[in-house]
Amino acid sequence: MSAAPKIVICGAGIAGIAAAYQLAIVHGVANVTLVEAGNPLSLTSDKSTEAYRNWWPGPDWQMTAFMDRSIDLIEEIARATDNRINLNRRGYLFATADETKIAFLAEMSQLAESRGAGAARFHESQSSAYVPSAERGFDSALSGADVITDRSLIRRHFPYLAPETVAVAHARRAGWLSAQQLGSAMLEAARERGVKLVRGKIVGVDARDRVRGVTVEHDGTHQSLEATYLVLAAGPMQKEMAQLVGIDLPIYSERHHKVSFADTDGVPRSAPMMIWLDAQYLPWSDDERAALETDEEARWLLQEFPPGVHGRPDGGHATLLLFNHHGEAVEPEFPMPDPPPHYGEISLRGMSTMVPGLRAYVGKPFRPYVDGGYYVKTRENRPLIGPTPTEGLYVSCGYSGFGVMASCAGGELIARHIVGALLPDYAPAFLLSRYQDPEYISLIDRWGDGGQL
């Protein structure tokens, strides 16, 4: 790297903070500035389930290796901070009541194993040696996934699941953490090493021949910051920021929402992250169904809903639910529009198909807190991390629903690009330049979903 570089990072979400942390703490870069229009970790980084997994069935090994590296780095921070970040390793539990999906779960587990996620273990009798996850801690040696098809074994270990459940796949190097504490720990350490935080929005970039500086606006005033390198890590504002230098990034946004509510009767506090793999019709009573049939505006609630409702316990007496049954691309706007009609009720009823204990809340006063954010995605659902055609300009974005879990490896990778350090083998998979490869473009059509729940 040239002498005394000045690095400006646009965005103090978890991706931008992780980049600043790596540059300052690992590489000793002295002049790093985070520019953030709002409060750090507030735009999208606090809107997720805060979960992580290395279980990526496809399309190849790069995402698994990338996530394994990120989890390694997260675990390092957990150990260094006496687990201030509340990291656990309870796993992800994928469940189905559809016998035709048993083969699918087996195939996905074997594919994940072939891509480096760990062994696929099969439990087909009640005497099988399945090892439950610990409620606390993250030092389990288990990785891969346990596929359980014996219903008595499922009932023994997961008695709260719907009795119709015929199979589960328990992905083991997975769980959740406090994203706010992870981000705060990295930000505090980075600022102790001299990283500066400037409040404002980047409204101009001097990049006539290469990046030389940015203009920051705050409360109607403007200031100029010199920059040898500029990292765009602006989350849902990334496309707008890239357009300041004439780059149209191949990303789009989806609006997602999260439900949190007080729960003392439904989801056990020791449960893992749970995902229901089956499409469903929401459970309505006969009277409710008849009423919905006569209401033209509400009749859509009787339609079939897609797979993927998921949730987990959160803290002492809260449960988080997500059921993003609306996945259209949108333009980001703030403040965010109201959630879809009846989102809390739909999520509760949808999750109650998997965890019938949640039906205790149906028909009773239900006061969920619903907030939301944006998933920023590439077509194949892989991030963009690395240089752009503009010299000195780098991007770290497209983290979709896996930004928290990917942040540490993403920060490490962007820092290594900037300082010229040795890059990991998976680095080419996330370059913007991959879209200039005709062979890669043809592969995307065959890949489909790259790992989103």
Image: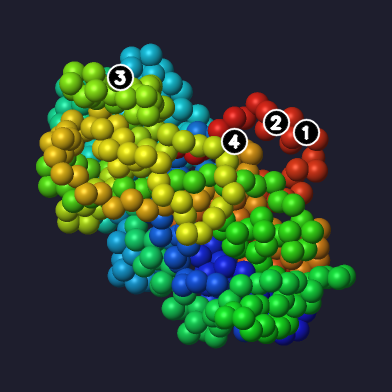
Q: Residue tagged by mark 1?
A: 439
> Nearer the observer, disc 3 or disc 4?
3
Residue receiving disc 2: 443
* Disc 3 from disc 1: Cα separation: 50 Å
Instruction: Return the disc, 3 or 1, that comes first in the chain's sequence.
Output: 3
Asked if the residue under mark 2 is in contact with the one under mark 1, i.e. CB atoms within 8 Å, the reply is yes
Nearer mark to the viewer, of 4 and 1: 1
Question: Mark 2 near mark 3, Cβ–Cβ under 8 Å?
Answer: no
Q: Is residue 357 left or right of residue 90?
A: left
Residue at 38%, 65% (x, y): give it. Answer: 180
Q: Secondary structure at mark 3?
A: helix
Which quadrant would the C terminus be assigned to in this image? top left
Instruction: Residue type at mark 3: give it.
Output: Glu
Callout 1 crowding tier (Cα within 10 Å): few <14, some 14–19, many ≥20 = few
Instruction: Measuring from the top left, give residue 255's x and y in whole percent.
Output: 49, 46
In the foreground, 413 or 144:
413
Q: Nearer the viewer, residue 207 or 442?
A: 207
Q: Is residue 159 visible?
A: yes
- 138 to 268, vertically: above or below: below
- Residue 364 falls in which quadrant of the image? top left
User: Can you say whether 281 is above or below 194 in the image?
Assistant: above
Which secondary structure lies at badge 2?
helix
Could you tell me the amino acid type at mark 1?
Glu
Q: Position of residue 39 (x, y in %)?
A: 46, 72
Marks 3/4: CA distance? 46 Å
Cα–Cα span, label 2 and label 3: 44 Å
Which residue in the protein does label 4 denote? 60
Say which residue appears at 66% left-offset and 78% top-offset. 216
135 to 228, vertically: above or below: above
Q: Amino acid at mark 4?
A: Asp
Residue labelled with disc 3? 293
